[in-house]
Image: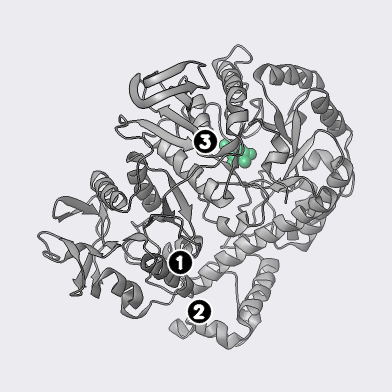
Amino acid sequence: MPDLGAAIGGRILFGGDYNPEQWPEETWHEDVRLMKDAGVNSVTLGVFSWAKLEPHPGAREFGWLDTLMDLMHDSGIGVVLATPTSSPPPWMGRLHPDTLPRAEDGRTEWWGGRQHFSHSSATYRRYAAAITEDLAARYGGHPALRMWHINNEYCTTDHGDEAAAAFRRWLREKYGTLEALNTAWGTAFWSQGYDSWDGILPARQPHYLKNPAQVLDFRRFTSDMLLECYVAERDIVRRHTPHLSVTTNFMPLWFGQDAWRWAEEEDVVSVDLYPDPRDPLGAQHGALVQDMTRSQARGPWMLMEQAAGPVNWRGVNHPKPRGLNRLWSLQAVARGADAVCYFQWRQSRQGAEKFHSGMISHAGEEGRTFQEVKRLGADLARIGEHVTGTAVRADVAILHDWHAWWAGAQDGRPSSEVDHPALLHAWHRALWESGLTTDFAHPEHDLSAYKCVALPRLYLLTDAAIGNLLGYVHGGGTLVCGFHTAVADEDDRVRPGGMDARLRELFGIRTLHEWWPLDAGERVECEGFHGTLWSEEIEAAGTADETIPYKGGELDGLPAVLRRGRAWYVSTLPEPEALRALLARITAEAGVRPVLDGLPEGVEAVRRGALLFLLNHRRDPVSVEVPGTHHDLLSGGTISDRITLGRYGTAVLRP
Ligand code: GAL
């Protein structure tokens, strides 16, 4: 299978989405000059070019793209060629309304924006396959072509009639008989028993709460349908260019897509990442997404999009202060990225994203944004050969699963305050602030390489996952598990006792009497710390080795935290400092070491291959102890035992 190495040849891929169709041809030459100036070695062409390539049904306008492919090749810039299928031309919706998706209330999602396609539409798929086929046939042999980018941020849902038919087919395949479906969905509740497949709907808007098992299957179906669209286009380009790798860009922690499953179908995993420059935890959010993407890729991955300055889709869109773009880009490289790319090369003057930054902002060549991009290009060129292809190793993993998220995020549950991504962020933050490098894993993955596994909350766990966790702990691993976990089986059926019995035994829980969710802002006192969000009325079995009790209130004296051997259960969300301390203790006892001891606050250290990345997330200079003598690949200097990092400063140290 081709991988990223083939596309990049020892350089970090540096560049971005290039949308030359928005500009006159003179600008293309200006673009190339500036790209070379900035060390750009890759552009992604064609992401939103469908109407330009196929202005009328069946027409083909390749001339402009021929010119650009040649121009890029002549300039030594590689092309990641996108299939344009995320934004069908207006004629498609006009002539084929069946290609337009429907919201759950029946509303049509019209053209005039983007991503207005139904994943289940045979007409859409036929047109998408045809343009993909012709692009691959025409450019498969072009020397500028480095790899393929399929569609863009697959994210649509559809509740229309064609989706309904596809959903029924999908369900038939899964369940075989209506009886099995009725059992799995618990349709005895509220008189929902189906007597015909034709009666089943794609979770359209009902009067009151939806059937949660139906919603769960609809989410699985949606992810699978979008994946089918991806695979269909991937297989077409693969047939033409088996030697080139294929990706599609993920949105980070996107609810609609089982990215574990998707990653298996990609040669290279890529992600779009836009932390808020004003968010005090923006760097940690970046680290989380980077850790998750690396884990999905099981190796180097691509930062396919980021912003050189502000985005335009938050309420208030802050620019990146001087140095932040470089810092966050190098953070991605530290955490495994072999590509640092942007949306987009040149900031648009028209269209919905004209206030979204580009590598060249409206201020042009002299603008700070481009000047900083240029500096970054030079930095990446300096470290590329030392870093590409190398691995980041982690001794601790956080477990995450989309199915558990989907099932646990439904209406009609004990607390709508509980938010799956927020819990992942809280636990990841605790480890990040302790200077530990963290992978993510699926609960059914082989976990034996990890000294410690953290499970913030997985409301749904399959029997296979439970067996995997038991095997992991019995094999010597340390497991620390958050509240409201293993409540449901894979049909979202509550397990007897409100939590899987094998896991209760593992943690030393005799009875889980009640969940006691907390209101927003409410705190529950525990011995030595405060819990938030959630608490549980648990009776420990005599076998628990250690408990930390709740103090005061209804749960006074009952265990907030239990340990049995190497298995920990945490029935609340400790406040950030307390969670950090708890996880620091547990991981240390499991033998997990921070990347560097004594790191000052706000400084991140990551090892990638033989290199040590030091990243100062503060605006003031900071001095960091690094025992031994090192060569800083960025500054070219020699470092003995101590280094000073300036505002947002970074060092890449080689022993
Ligand atoms: C991404 C998308 C790009 C652009 C960018 C703006 O979601 O793939 O096309 O819209 O966001 O931040």
Q: Which residue type does callout 1 highlight?
A: Ala
Numbered disc 2: secondary structure: helix
Q: Position of residue 129 (x, y in %)?
A: 81, 54
Q: Is residue 384 left or right of residue 453?
A: right
The residue drawn where x is 57% and y is 38% is 337
Check the image and report above or below for 197 versus 634: below
Picture quarter with ligand 1: top right
Res 470 quadrant in image: bottom left
Q: Position of residue 265 (x, y in %)?
A: 67, 56
The foreground one among 228 and 638 is 638
Q: Position of residue 127 (x, y in %)?
A: 82, 54
Res 285 quadrant in image: top left
Res 338 quadrant in image: top right
- Mark 1 lies on residue: 407
Q: Which residue type does callout 3 highlight?
A: Ala
Numbered disc 1: secondary structure: helix
The residue drawn where x is 64% and y is 83% is 176
Q: Residues within 10 Å of mark 3 (few under 14, many from 20)?
A: many
- In three-dimensional space, the C-alpha distance between marks 2 and 3, rounded to whole angstroms, equals 42 Å
Q: Residues within 10 Å of mark 1 (few under 14, many from 20)?
A: many
- In three-dimensional space, the C-alpha distance between marks 1 and 3, rounded to whole angstroms, equals 31 Å
Q: Earlier in the sequence, mark 1 or mark 3?
A: 3
- In three-dimensional space, the C-alpha distance between marks 1 and 2, rounded to whole angstroms, equals 12 Å
Q: Which residue type does callout 2 highlight?
A: Trp
The residue drawn where x is 51% and y is 30% is 330
- Mark 3 lies on residue: 332
Number of numbered discs visible in the structure rendering: 3
- Tell me, yes or no, if residue 320 can be seen here: no
Mark seen at residue 185: 2
Q: Is residue 330 left or right of residue 598?
A: right
